[in-house]
Image: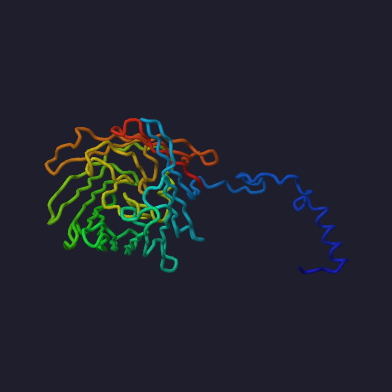
Amino acid sequence: MKHFPLPLTLLILSILSISPACHKPPPPKPDPPITDTVPKTDTTPPKKDTIQYVIRIEEDFLQSNPTIDRRNRDYSFYYDNDKRVTAVGIKNYDNVLYDTATCWLFYTGSAPKPRMIITPNFSVSSPGGTLYYDTTWFTYDNSNRILSDSGIEHANGLYPAITVNPLKRTWSYPDDTKTLITWYGVPAPGSPLQIIRKDSINAAAGEISNMRTQFYYGNGTRGNYASTESFLYSTYINPLSKLNISGTIFSLIYSPVKLEILGNSDHKAVSNTNILPYYLDFYSTQMPSGFYLGGFTSGDFLIGSTYDQFDIQITPGIKRPEYPSQISVGARTALDDRFIYRFYY
């Protein structure tokens, strides 16, 4: 610590004692709470679009019959100084899937988008067993839109039990409102790389109007498809859309996502059973309050004779009321079962 001569020290103290702007009050007891208020001396108005970064999402499952409310999963987000996501911690509860795992994201220099993501694979990992990871590499256009990604996927096989298969996607943007994604993968152990899925997304300004997700069997044979439509958007900001890894209708933070639409791999195009209302949306800029998700056969017959109507009940934040503090998600064939997502910033 640097010491000043006594006369200079007395002069500084004299100036401080007569300057009201620099008056130092006695130490408060206890320390005052930290607030978000703007100091009176600052005349700059606060920005209304200040980005709030989510640091944790807690996911609960509320089962109606019998009534059970249990923690399902936690997502913890970590950032660098440029607010790029560098890691996502994932914790599962009730001894399902793997216990804990981490998604890692890697960047080239100051690039805003990741060049590589290493994700935990939930379909082949188990509690107390080997934890498998998949790796995906990305390329972008001059507007930082994904052009392609390719990866190595661990999958269940006949022999050996776990196989390593290639997986890649190509992206195109015919206009400002449409995105096309073609998926290539291995539909069966030992088969060559083939088309396994196609997405057609119609959206403007981050609000989806409709999507069609076509699934394929081997040799390009069309299978079931999903239609997601009739989005009704709220005025609440979707915090996941603010992340530098936003803009996809499936998650980039875990794998596999070959069947996933907005965080849900239990829709009617996958299985003709009551749905589980999972919802993890990295695309919509505003939180939807509802939408419809239906499954169809290759012959255009509606599976289960009904769309699943998703309803999203939003609880606003206290400090930032334009952001949600919690959402409760249900779907028609989920009956009264719901998933609860709590957001922490």
Residue that extends furthest to the right in the rendered view of this protein: 7
Which quarter of the figure has residue 184? bottom left
| 295 displayed left or right of 291 | left
Q: Is residue 48 visible?
A: yes
For this rendering, which residue is in front, 272 or 296?
A: 272
> Residue at left 48%, top 37%?
316
Instruction: Tell me if residue 334 comes above or below residue 223 in the rendering.
Output: above
Name the colour scheme. rainbow
> Residue at left 18%, top 40%?
296
Residue 198 x/y as whole percent = 21, 52
Q: Quadrant of the N terminus?
A: bottom right
For this rendering, which residue is in front, 304 or 182?
A: 304
Q: Is residue 184 visible?
A: no
Residue 169 x/y as whole percent = 25, 59
For this rendering, which residue is in front, 164 or 319?
A: 164
Residue 328 x/y as whole percent = 41, 36
Disc tally is: 0
| 16 displayed left or right of 248 | right
Residue 226 x/y as whole percent = 22, 43
Which quarter of the figure has residue 295? top left
